[in-house]
Image (spheres, rainbow, N blue to C red):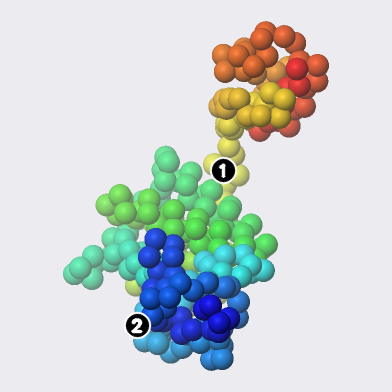
């Protein structure tokens, strides 16, 4: 507050990004939790209301391990709803499993293998927050599926198990698997399904972005420069002149100096 004293976090009101305590404007600071700082959260209360998987998953989703992030009950609710949605994707109201014996095809198959690739790399690099985000995307895609293909159902649980072990263990056994999901093999991806066929190439003129073009990832420098110079948005700034210098970092950037 204005005295430089900490006030109870649970009594602070946020309105349009402005924080007040007893009607007085206060400043939010990021830092450690503690009773003396009046911002502590009792884990038992979170367990009781949302479950241990929600707390565990939320902590991994908060952000990079090295970053300081504010505790947000609203975000905890979002993670809790993700786990509820996951359960409803697998089990209907009568308790019947919504998983087919078929394997995935088309866009869902590609999304599955890209998710496995991304989550595997994120886990290896301790980027748990981005791993969770990838799993959110896959889970959202399953909402539109009448029955989850068996390969997707199995892989999703194995990817999520290190972060939300209890719900994954329960669903794993409901799918008929023997033994704990903890000792199940980590899913593998098919590189031919994860390869990106195209990329968005940014075109800069004298350091400023002037256009973006979708190009094949295999594009050559000559092809990229030709596309850049023929862009109507680029021509406005080059006047049709040949660039004095070209810097190409394909397939993502072509920078022209005129």
- The span from disc 1 to disc 2 (Cα, nearest Å) is 39 Å
Q: Is 182 in front, or is 50?
A: 50
Can residue 172 be seen here? The reply is: no
Hey, which quadrant is residue 168 in on the image? Answer: bottom left
- Above or below 114: residue 35: below
What residue would you read off at disc 2?
49
Label 2 SS: helix
Residue 77 percent coordinates (x, y): 37, 70
Q: Position of residue 192 (x, y in %)?
A: 58, 40
Answer above or below: position of 176 versus 152.
below
Q: Secondary structure at mark 1?
A: helix
Q: Is residue 212 left or right of residue 177?
A: right
1 and 2 marks in contact (CB < 8 Å): no
Would residue 219 be visible to someone looking at this image?
A: yes
Whichever of labels 1 and 2 marks the residue nearer the N terminus, that label is 2
Say which quarter of the image contains residue 196.
top right
Q: Residue furthest right?
A: 244
Q: Residue sitting at 45 percent across and 72 percent down?
A: 25
């Amino acid at each position: 507050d204005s005295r430089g004293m900490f006030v109870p976090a649970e009594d602070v009101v946020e309105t349009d990004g402005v924080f007040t305590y007893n009607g007085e404007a206060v400043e939010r600071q990021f830092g450690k939790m503690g009773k003396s700082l009046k911002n502590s959260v009792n884990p038992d209360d979170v367990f009781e209301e949302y479950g241990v998987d929600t707390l565990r998953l939320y902590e991994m989703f908060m952000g990079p391990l090295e970053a300081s992030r504010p505790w947000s009950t609203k975000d905890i609710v979002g993670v809790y709803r993700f786990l509820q949605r996951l359960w409803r994707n697998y089990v209907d109201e009568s308790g019947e499993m919504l998983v087919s014996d078929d394997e995935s095809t088309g866009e869902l198959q590609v999304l599955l293998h890209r998710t496995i690739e991304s989550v595997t790399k994120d886990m290896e690099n301790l980027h748990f927050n981005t791993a969770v985000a990838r799993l959110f995307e896959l889970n959202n895609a399953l909402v539109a599926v009448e029955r989850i293909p068996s390969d997707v159902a199995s892989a999703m649980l194995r990817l999520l198990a290190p972060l939300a072990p209890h719900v994954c263990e329960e669903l794993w056994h409901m799918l008929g698997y023997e033994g704990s999901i903890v000792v199940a093999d980590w899913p593998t991806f098919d590189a031919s399904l994860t390869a990106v066929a195209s990329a968005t190439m940014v075109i800069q003129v004298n350091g400023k972005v002037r256009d973006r073009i979708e190009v094949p990832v295999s594009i050559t420098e000559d092809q990229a420069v030709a596309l850049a110079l023929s862009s109507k948005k680029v021509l406005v700034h080059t006047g049709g002149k040949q660039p004095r210098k070209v810097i190409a970092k394909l397939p993502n950037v072509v920078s022209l100096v005129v």
